[in-house]
Amino acid sequence: MFKKFLSKIGIGSASVNLILEDASGRIGEKVVGRILVEGGAVDQKIDAIDVDFILEARLGDKTARTTIETIAVARDLHVPSGKQVEYPFAHQLPELPISSQYVRYTYHTRLDIPEAIDKHDFDQFYVQPSLPVATAIGAFHALGFYDKHDSGVFNGRYQEFEYAPLSGSESGPFAGRIDELTVVYLAEEDGVRLHIELDKTTKGLFGALADKLDLDESHFTLFLSYQSLQDSDATLQTIRRSLEAELNNPNPSRYPTLPKAHPHGQHKHRGGGAGSGLLGGIAGGIAGYAIGEALFGDDDSEQTADGGIIDDLGDFFGEDD
């Protein structure tokens, strides 16, 4: 009797552990593993085993968190005292922002024990880009660009990657000609569209004035088909020619090809929740991330203290009316 009481307050109760075959995975691929439930000091009924896949994004001095998906593993099970029960785990990674210093993912495994303290397990997970996007990213690196400190910021609608050219012996063909590149990779049905902001290197008094007035910037897009992205050398040459053409463009576009996000603006909520299914919900076709309506849930609660956690990315980042 005393053991049953202790199990209800979490002492000697059943425990849960998610064991993944790999702590990282690519977008579009399947994450696999197993869930171990260790019986406690007494036999226990378990109502459910669920795993939440959680995205946490940092923008400025705020952090937002949302559950991308909940994977139902088991229902209504009995765990004998001292015994171990094992369940297979599988999760298909949807289109997502990739992991960076600003974007983190966690698998939160929950053991729902009736009339007792639930048990939890947390596993960090690293989301890598899909192979086509990885090929494009690799091409920029091969052309002598490195990721700047602020690369990988996710503003709630799309993820920006900032590159600068290497100098010295490792410099590529654009050192001294390009100060910075900002690239957004958007997966489409037939390929990946790159939205690129290019900052030219300018010198002297005119260069300083051009930099202040953003006259050294140009904005353009480049579409890479999935077929072409199967050839890394061809991808590199396509990107190189595109950058060269833009550097020599006498009338570059000064207008961004992506709409600005409004991280602190007012917005209308969309209905639905974590069970509403996956859609190209962030920015409705702007980013194409299949994150789901949980991002724009109906919960109007919002914590605005600096450095606080806000549990709805829609509330935090905002949505255009």
Image (cartoon, grey):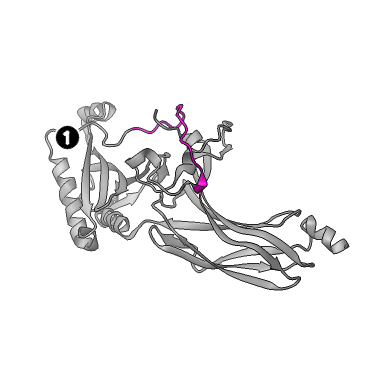
Residue numbers of the magenta segment: 260-275
Give me the residue at 41% from left, 31% from top: 262
Can you give x and y, in whole percent of width and height, for residue 200 in the image?
22, 38
Q: Quick check: can you spot residue 122? A: no
Q: Nearer the viewer, residue 200 or 59?
A: 59
| Corner quadrant of residue 130 | bottom left
At label 1, the amino acid type is: Pro
Give me the residue at 19% from left, 33% from top: 253
Image height of 267 relative to 101, above or below: above
What type of secondary structure mainly makes up the magenta span? loop
Give the farthest residue toward the bottom: 83
Give the farthest residue toward the right: 2
Give me the residue at 23% from left, 48% from top: 175
Can you give x and y, in whole percent of width and height, for residue 193 in the image?
25, 47
The quarter in which the C terminus is drawn is top left
Give me the residue at 79% from left, 67% from top: 42
Image height of 265 relative to 125, above or below: above
**Disc 1, SS:** loop
From the image, tell me which residue sits under label 1: 252
